[in-house]
């Protein structure tokens, strides 16, 4: 019973994280995952789409593969982190207290009692951010970092040499995307800067997200969300309680329910679902109907009937589903390709499926101050 409650808490946490994080999705969702990390008992298995085991290990936490590396955490009190290749062999030893995934050829790692540092794929130390409180993975050649001065956190950006090219002067910020980053000024308003730190869209929004691969961004003004273009002009006027990027469409929340609109703001699927995840590149999306999850097509028609206790969006041709406490994978016809038999799946896989993100994009300092 305790285990069941913990798992329900984790799922509720994922849903709430999605509600916040999906707005900030970077253009980095992996659609082709050849081996999936799942758990059977205490053993982590990397399985393929036919349920064949590529390799396994006693790892309590792992990532999916990015740039040919996967992050794995060792068991025990030390819980050190290293990196493996797609044969399951360690290529960088498990010596780190914290680590991010590799992105743009670099990962940020933290050793015991030390500040965050950047390493390349050979494990070579490139630089250390001695005064940083936190740092996130590279996007557009820039890494978002924070410092704390006089009890206040401020955000800036470093390049791949470790040079602070945009000094930490912002109350909050997002990673760069499409050459711009959303930043929050001292008055609590959001706008956008370019890679030189120059303001390109004035700070006038209550909230803002990164620009997506269609070069539009979600912004909140007067308690409602809309969509702006690269010039800061509204493509969709603020009118929704919440919005999420979803490939060529947007998920929208109205009167407590989720639906979808197109890039012009036209409603394509009415807001009638209490909970829902995105389509992304698929023609299927998971929605909650009653107390079970189902899948709808882009016309809003139920094509896989309500039957799952939890569901994730399709990644490629497979979607992870829960039946009770067990996880399996279905195809787009709703048939099992991998029967429900696993008792865990990587949080990183869930993050990629749910909002195109990762669970390992940020580290914080271990350095004593």
Image (cartoon, rainbow, N blue to C red):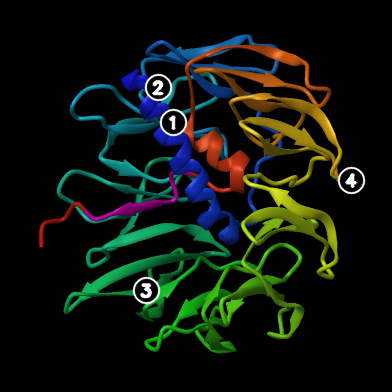
Q: CA distance from mark 4 to mark 3?
A: 42 Å
Q: How many marks?
A: 4
Image height check: is 284 above or below 178?
above
| Dot placed on the residue nearer the N-terminal end, 2 or 3 | 2
| Residue at image mark 2 | 4
State the CA–CA distance, disc 2 to disc 4.
Answer: 35 Å
Q: Are marks 2 and 1 in contact (CB under 8 Å)?
A: yes
Q: Give the residue displayed 35% in from the left and 17% down from the top.
A: 1
Q: CA distance from mark 3 to mark 1?
A: 34 Å
Please state the extent of the stretch shown in magenta in the rendering. Answer: 359-365
Depth check, front residue: 337 or 136: 337
Is 354 on the left-hand or right-hand side of 190?
Answer: right
Between label 3 and label 1, give the one nearer the viewer: 1
101 or 269: nearer the viewer: 269
Name which residue lies at 56% across and 61% down. 24
- Identify the residue position indicated by label 3 in the image: 155
Residue indicated by mark 4: 299
Q: Is residue 69 above or below residue 24?
A: above
């Amino acid at each position: 019973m305790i285990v069941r409650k913990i798992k329900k808490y984790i799922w509720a946490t994922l849903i709430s994280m999605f509600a916040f994080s999906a707005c900030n999705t970077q253009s980095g969702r992996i659609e082709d995952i050849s081996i999936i990390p799942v758990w059977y008992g205490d053993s982590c298995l990397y399985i393929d789409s036919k349920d064949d085991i590529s390799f396994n290990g006693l790892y309590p936490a792992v990532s999916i593969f990015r740039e040919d590396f996967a992050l794995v955490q060792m068991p025990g009190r030390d819980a050190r982190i290293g990196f493996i290749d797609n044969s399951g062999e360690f290529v960088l030893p498990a010596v780190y207290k914290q680590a991010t995934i590799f992105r743009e050829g670099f990962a940020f790692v933290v050793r015991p009692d030390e500040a965050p540092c950047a390493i390349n794929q050979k494990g070579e130390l490139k630089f250390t951010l001695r005064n940083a409180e936190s740092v996130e993975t590279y996007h557009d050649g820039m890494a978002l970092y924070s410092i704390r001065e006089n009890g206040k956190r401020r955000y800036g950006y470093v390049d791949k040499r470790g040079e602070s090219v945009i000094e930490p002067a912002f109350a909050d910020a997002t990673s760069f995307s499409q050459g711009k980053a959303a930043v929050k000024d001292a008055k609590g308003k959001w706008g956008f800067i370019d890679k030189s730190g120059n303001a390109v869209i004035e700070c006038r929004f209550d909230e803002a997200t990164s620009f997506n691969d269609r070069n539009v961004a979600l912004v909140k003004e007067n308690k409602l969300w809309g969509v702006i273009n690269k010039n800061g002009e509204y493509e969709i006027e603020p009118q929704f309680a919440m919005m999420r990027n979803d490939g060529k469409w947007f998920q929208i929340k109205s009167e407590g329910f989720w639906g979808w609109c197109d890039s012009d703001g036209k409603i394509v699927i009415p807001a009638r679902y209490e909970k829902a995840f995105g389509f992304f590149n698929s023609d299927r999306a998971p929605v909650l109907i009653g107390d079970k999850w189902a899948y709808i097509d882009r016309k809003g028609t139920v094509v896989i009937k309500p039957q799952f206790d939890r569901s994730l969006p399709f990644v490629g041709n497979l979607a992870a589903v829960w039946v009770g406490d067990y996880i399996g994978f279905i195809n787009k016809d709703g048939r099992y390709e991998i029967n429900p038999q696993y008792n865990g799946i990587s949080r990183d896989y869930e993050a990629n499926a749910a909002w195109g993100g990762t669970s390992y994009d940020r580290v914080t300092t271990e350095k004593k101050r």
